[in-house]
Image (spheres, coloured by chain):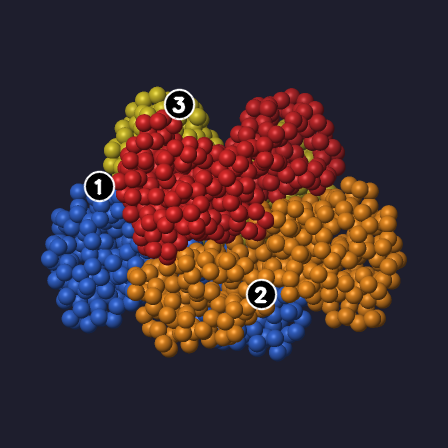
Chain colours: A orange, B blue, C yellow, D red
Amino acid sequence: MKQDLKNIAVLTSGGDAPGMNACIRAVIRTGIYHGKNMFGVMQGYQGLIDNNIIPMDARSVSNILHMGGTILKTARCLAFKEEAGMELAFKNLQEKEIDGLVVIGGDGTFTGAKRFGEKYNINVIGVPGTIDNDLSGSDFTLGYDTAINTVIEAIDKIRDTADSHDRLFFIEVMGRDSGCIALRTAVASGAEAVLLPERETSLKELITKLKAGASTKKSSSIVIVSEGNKYGGAYDIAKSVKRKFTHYDTKVTILGHLQRGGSPSGFDRILGSRLGYAAVNALIAGESMQMVGLYGNAIKLTSLEDALNTHNYKLESDLLEMTHVLSI
Amino acid sequence: MKQDLKNIAVLTSGGDAPGMNACIRAVIRTGIYHGKNMFGVMQGYQGLIDNNIIPMDARSVSNILHMGGTILKTARCLAFKEEAGMELAFKNLQEKEIDGLVVIGGDGTFTGAKRFGEKYNINVIGVPGTIDNDLSGSDFTLGYDTAINTVIEAIDKIRDTADSHDRLFFIEVMGRDSGCIALRTAVASGAEAVLLPERETSLKELITKLKAGASTKKSSSIVIVSEGNKYGGAYDIAKSVKRKFTHYDTKVTILGHLQRGGSPSGFDRILGSRLGYAAVNALIAGESMQMVGLYGNAIKLTSLEDALNTHNYKLESDLLEMTHVLSI
Amino acid sequence: MKQDLKNIAVLTSGGDAPGMNACIRAVIRTGIYHGKNMFGVMQGYQGLIDNNIIPMDARSVSNILHMGGTILKTARCLAFKEEAGMELAFKNLQEKEIDGLVVIGGDGTFTGAKRFGEKYNINVIGVPGTIDNDLSGSDFTLGYDTAINTVIEAIDKIRDTADSHDRLFFIEVMGRDSGCIALRTAVASGAEAVLLPERETSLKELITKLKAGASTKKSSSIVIVSEGNKYGGAYDIAKSVKRKFTHYDTKVTILGHLQRGGSPSGFDRILGSRLGYAAVNALIAGESMQMVGLYGNAIKLTSLEDALNTHNYKLESDLLEMTHVLSI
Amino acid sequence: MKQDLKNIAVLTSGGDAPGMNACIRAVIRTGIYHGKNMFGVMQGYQGLIDNNIIPMDARSVSNILHMGGTILKTARCLAFKEEAGMELAFKNLQEKEIDGLVVIGGDGTFTGAKRFGEKYNINVIGVPGTIDNDLSGSDFTLGYDTAINTVIEAIDKIRDTADSHDRLFFIEVMGRDSGCIALRTAVASGAEAVLLPERETSLKELITKLKAGASTKKSSSIVIVSEGNKYGGAYDIAKSVKRKFTHYDTKVTILGHLQRGGSPSGFDRILGSRLGYAAVNALIAGESMQMVGLYGNAIKLTSLEDALNTHNYKLESDLLEMTHVLSI
């Protein structure tokens, strides 16, 4: 691993997440504070290949801390999966004498970073930036907290109208392989039930639960559906339930991409700032091939390899138990 | 028409809308202030038939001004369309000597109110409460302003992620027969195009517009789709466009019922308060078969008949022109 | 007045207001749409004097529609009140052959615009941009609706804690000479009383009102205080009331400048867009020395002279009456 | 300590905090789920003395999860500090055979709980409910996350107007003895400086920092002031700074009690639910004189004695260092 880095670049890749801008700002300013030359790479790995690498000063990240999205943009990049693409990327970095790279993103981003860092002589630090919270090595990934707030604000509005009409709502949230958003928003919105990719819930069980609620005079019921559960999307489930349980008027909402946007919460602004700050400090300390993460209330390093090992990742099963008890 | 009313009831019917609670509060307190006995009817016309009519005092409407939905609930009621249902409803009102009725709702609600008021000896005043803004006789219906704010807050979040990815978003908003929400939110969110039930937009025209934007380096495009436009839902349109224009990654969001909920905006709280206040004052003045509405900055009365005449209602075509000019 | 304008500039002056950016965007894009060369003046009249006048294209106003503040900034400018300052300003405009000027601001801004337009050969159109709503000729000024929403969201939060503690809150809102914000927010937040610059409310009357509320078991009371009322700030009034009425624990909040900020509401984004669009169209039509305003649901022109005549401006006294009736 | 509890009561005391209602709901429903009889005590310890103790069922806590404040209300209670008050409180609990008590509040609340539990035969579990985050034994107290979001939303609005005017803002936030809110909001809002009760910042140092920012063309500066810092309130500090540094126009905002209110964030709803759930489970397990807290991502018990030991509590000094680096 390189020591005494002089030039550091940062990029965002994969799905964007609130707090990425806070993190970019922290990376740039921490680097400048320590006398490094700082660069931003546009559109993720694609920008490395296209040599879309821009010098950045402290003012270039003014007034972005509170903004959703990412000023560096992000893109899928198939070319970076090929040998040729990676080589071109490295050549472009070498030309600018960039010897440290901070990549902000999720598991796809880290997979690319790991292969790149293994092959080429550049120090790489990952920052977990994804609303899905599906990485090991960080209690919270960047954007997760904001996404939960966005979902529950939407559900609060839906609850108004659900209550006014004695309605049953199925609300589909993001999470193809991970039920993290679904589970936390179910607790936070007082949902009657939640369907997750990680757990099987039989329709029979669900209907029993809904009937019990109706019989105790619940004025409305809300079921959170993670997009990756085994029964298909919220529309399909609503149809299946409707066939066997007709007490309520049934409606469906698909929240979609608004879950990725919005001004980051305080939690995500602080997390993004801490992780960006820690990422640059790790590079300066000569670290590479690590992810910076939040563990309890402290920052720690995890190897990219361990971060990508989803077997380390566990659903908070105490919360699942709680959804049953608290929605009686 | 009756004079010297003693007992007044209020109900909400049809789809709920933010500001209904502000209006209920104003109705109850204005009546009490003038020495009337006030009643709330639960679940719209169904509550009249079921005799679900509850005496209400000033404290019964405390702390509801800021709440979405309606504390009186609302329901569809087929029985009230029948002679027998209306008769039972009138009997229940007579029993409690209720001689004035305020109905808050949209065109379906007013149609029922009109038939009821024509047939039975009770004074009826309507309040335009619907997010769709599709009644004549009021510049703004109750809930319209809040719904617009809700939609644009959602689009602001989507814009974050659209910009980060160079994406094209199709966003479906409410409005089966009326493009009011679509048109105003298109202006307010800087959408590149809008599809309305009232106007034909050819797909060819739409694609030309999107191509023009892409060529001037727009980083993202947003198209607002009113659910009642001629091409079907946002999913269908997105598919058709995608076939002929592949520059952007295309995504769809269906906002659904969250548009009906949420804490009412200042505008809707004031409007609900004014309309409720005016409705009771109209009843006290001996009026009946009228709707109270906002005209410019003043309250005026329109006959229920005229309010239901959609030929009087016009889309704000200057706004449509503006969406073209301002999204260059 | 000049015809066939070629070059148009826009500036914001005085206190900033949400919706100014929406208006700037509309001015720039409407001008470009009609083939004009467009310019932005930085920091209000100061930028005219300093020749801080920048060419703007359609992309220069991308992604600003939803932002609070003003990208053109604003400043107080004493020099523009002098002959020499105005002359320098005109020379700078002449140099760039700018023959049309859109000024967005409040009464101070318009006073300057009127003197400038009377003296020099340039067409001037004003846009009412101030949260105070204290101009004649427009039912709503730009930023007023957003400011009301900002205040009531703050009061909603305060109401939570007021209710939890049986407390009396005095909340000071902006409005040195105009009680518009105070009056509308009082209605929209269900305040028990409101103190305005335009009306005298005796402390005795206020205390009587608060006692009546306490005796009917109100769990909390909120009094809105316009900064320009005759008793001084909210702290002073709270102290005076406390001396004579000790039932509640008394607290004070000064909302201050957060009332000027925030993402504009849908209403203000649409209003800003319409007014900017109309301002440029007025210039193109050869108009000058006029203000564009919202009247009912239509745009109309008022001379700057009439707009500045505060005798035309009237407090909505029906709302004041309503605050008494609805807070029983 | 008692085993096999049958009847459990819950109360909120001290300053209210967002998430208290989520916690009350969890306490009531977890108890009912396990077959206990549940009671709510109105107005904190005062309600124990006044025998204002109400049986609660699962429906009595419907639709409160998302509400700020506390449905059980809270009050200061001097009488409970006296022997006689505590004895009366215990008699009232005995009468209803209540053998378990959950108290939600801050250090004052816990001090009372500790004395009560030491003296009388009743099992007591504390839940850390205060926006100040000044207890040991929980990384986050209930309401802290929401308060931070409330403050930064306010500062975001102020930043709009600060940027438009090249202004310097002093913003006073809550925290008489604890700078937690000030420190986290300083990071999350990109403040240029922060004044805390725990650390001395010389005015000279502050002015040097502000001058450095002005010289690098910062368009605005924001200083967060914790109410408990040594220089007095934000008004005093603003005056002192103004005397020596006149580059910016200086403004002050006192956020006050709006920091205590608002719908709880997702984080606080989940935290409140988990802590309430854990508190009842602890009582059922025979625990007493403990506080339930969040440690990392797990729930743990701390003795009330340790929770009250502020020597265990530490300011996050890495964040303080970060505010310097990131605001360059």
Where A258 falls versus C242 (above or below)? below
Q: Which residue is mark 1?
A: B33
Cα separation, mark 3 vs mark 1, equals 31 Å
* Image depth: mark 3 or mark 2 in front: 2
Q: Secondary structure at mark 2?
A: loop
Q: Quadrant of residue B88?
A: bottom left
User: Disc 1 is attached to a residue of which chain?
Assistant: B
Residue C169 in view (yes/no): no
10 Å crowding of disc 1: few (<14), some (14-19), many (20+): some
Horizontal side of residue C66 vs B76, given as left or right = right
Report the number of numbered marks.
3
Cα separation, mark 3 vs mark 2, equals 56 Å
Q: Secondary structure at mark 1?
A: helix
Q: Depth check: give the residue in front, A122 or C274.
A: A122
Q: Which residue is mark 3?
A: C239
Where D108 falls versus D95 (above or below)? above
Rendering coords of residue C278 (x, y %): 53, 52
* Image depth: mark 1 or mark 2 in front: 2
Asked if labels 1 and 2 share a chain, the reply is no
Residue A299 in view (yes/no): yes
User: Disc 3 is attached to a residue of which chain?
Assistant: C
Give the number of the disc on residue A178.
2
